Amino acid sequence: MLKKIFNWLMQPIGLIAVGIVFLSVFSAAVYGISLTQQTPPQPIEFPHQTHVQFGIQCLYCHPGAAKGPAAGIPSQAKCWACHNQIEKTGTSELLAPLKNAVLSGESIQWVPVAIVPDFVQFNHRAHVAAGKNCEDCHGDMSKVNIAINPQVMNMGWCLNCHIETAGEDEEKLIKLTDCGTCHY
Amino acid sequence: MTTLADLKISEVKLAAEEGGKWGMVIDQDICTGCQACVAACAMENNIPFVGEEDSGYGRAMHWIRIERFWQGEYPEVKMTNQQPMMCQQCGSAPCEPVCPAFATVHSQAEELNLQVYNRCVGTRYCANNCPYQVRTFNWRDYERPEPLPNQFNPDVTVRRRGVMEKCTFCIQRIHQANHKAKAEGRELMDGEFTTACAQACPSNAITFGRVDKKDTQVYQMMHHGQSHGKKHLEELGTLPNITYLNGGGA
């Protein structure tokens, strides 16, 4: 039985069939992996680049980054402060969900893009205080619409920067590579 | 002539004199055993409720417990002072060298025993090697019915099944206070923050703070005159960082 199948596979049509099966499995795997690397769909196709080009600082909408653990996502009230004027021109279709949210009073369900697991305790304040700029980790927002992660945010990536930052300073290195600094 | 054993004890004593960074003083004479610290600890550190059945198997997961003992022979039994027991944050911890996954390591920065949940594979070796029996294991993913998840402390990891855990000296509060002090550009002050158990204690039996500075409250209490201060199982050379004050009264 096995011999029969093997003989069939070794003839030209069998080899082609094997090739097709292999290609389809491979492309399905690639497609599956690519799905995990896409940015999640957002309720509004928020154009970061437009806002950055108008000269709005990151901290205007994400003020938590300078003060505490979470940078924060602005409430629609903050968006509406500017956009209630812009909306009157009726030129942007993208603003419709925002207007609906403001009128109905329901909050917009943004999907966080840069996230760490529950067992990682991340604090923006310490990183901003250490002289890190937003784009060092989050990429250049003047080039993207919906925020994307420019790199995989894993522990190796964190530690590389921590070790680099500590440099020759022994005490700093101990603090920055201590498990208890991030995991508790 | 000094023998090898003497030398080892003197080395241990030398290390003990150096002490850790954070310490705690528990005054057993004023502890009423009200369990407020146990409740506060569970709330602060997202400790699950194991329920009646698992508790019966000895799987209760409190990071701090109130121990009490009887003294004397039957008709004349007397209860000893209540004794809150939690991780002693040993300077030379028996739990640390036995972990095959390096999940329980000694923090050089804070000089505490850390439990790294994402590294823990659940061999439970550390708990078996702890002379204070203060480590608890997540035997299951214990259910938290609504609306209990709303009171999770976001600064503390919610542990899952198969992970060992223990008292952390509220390291999240240490970090939080450090962040606050740094943001305001000053040094961390003594008594600025405290652990959840110390905060909840109605009789102020628990005091938490730095032990490596002489002007802190904890240091003063530890070294006050003819102090009755005692560290538990110190003879094992674990260098615990919790001092118990016990006048001996009931």
Image: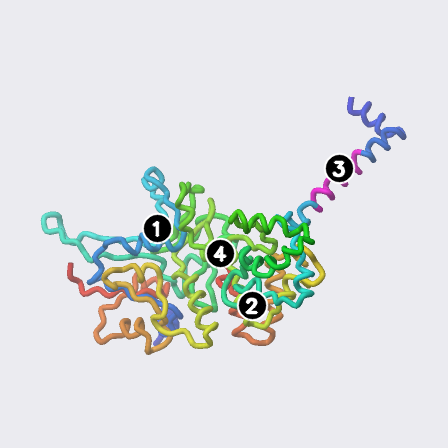
Say which of B2 and B140 sits in front: B140
Q: Amino acid at mark 3?
A: Val
Considering the numbered disc 4 on the image, is that residue within a helix, a strand or a loop? loop
Give the residue drawn at x 75%, y 37%.
A25
The residues tagged by marks 2 and 4 sit, at their Cα atoms, a distance apart of 22 Å
Mark 3 on the same chain as mark 1: no
Where does label 4 land, which residue?
B116
The quarter of the displayed image where residue A129 is located = bottom right
Chain for numbered disc 3: A
Where does label 1 land, which residue?
B62
Q: Which quadrant does the N terminus of chain A fall into?
A: top right
Any part of residue A148 in sight: no
Q: Which residue range is magenta in the image?
A: A21-34
What percent of the width, then of the height, locates residue A131? Answer: 59, 72
The quarter of the displayed image where residue B96 is located = bottom left
- Residue A73 colored magenta? no
CB atoms at circles 2 and 4 under 8 Å apart? Answer: no
Where residue B136 is drawn, which disc sits there? none
> Crowdedness of circle 2 by 10 Å Cα count: few (<14), some, many (20+)?
some
Q: Residue furthest top?
A: A1
Chain for numbered disc 2: A
Answer above or below: position of B241 versus B160.
below
Dominant secondary structure (helix, strand or loop) of the stretch shown in magenta = helix
- Dot in front, 2 or 4: 2
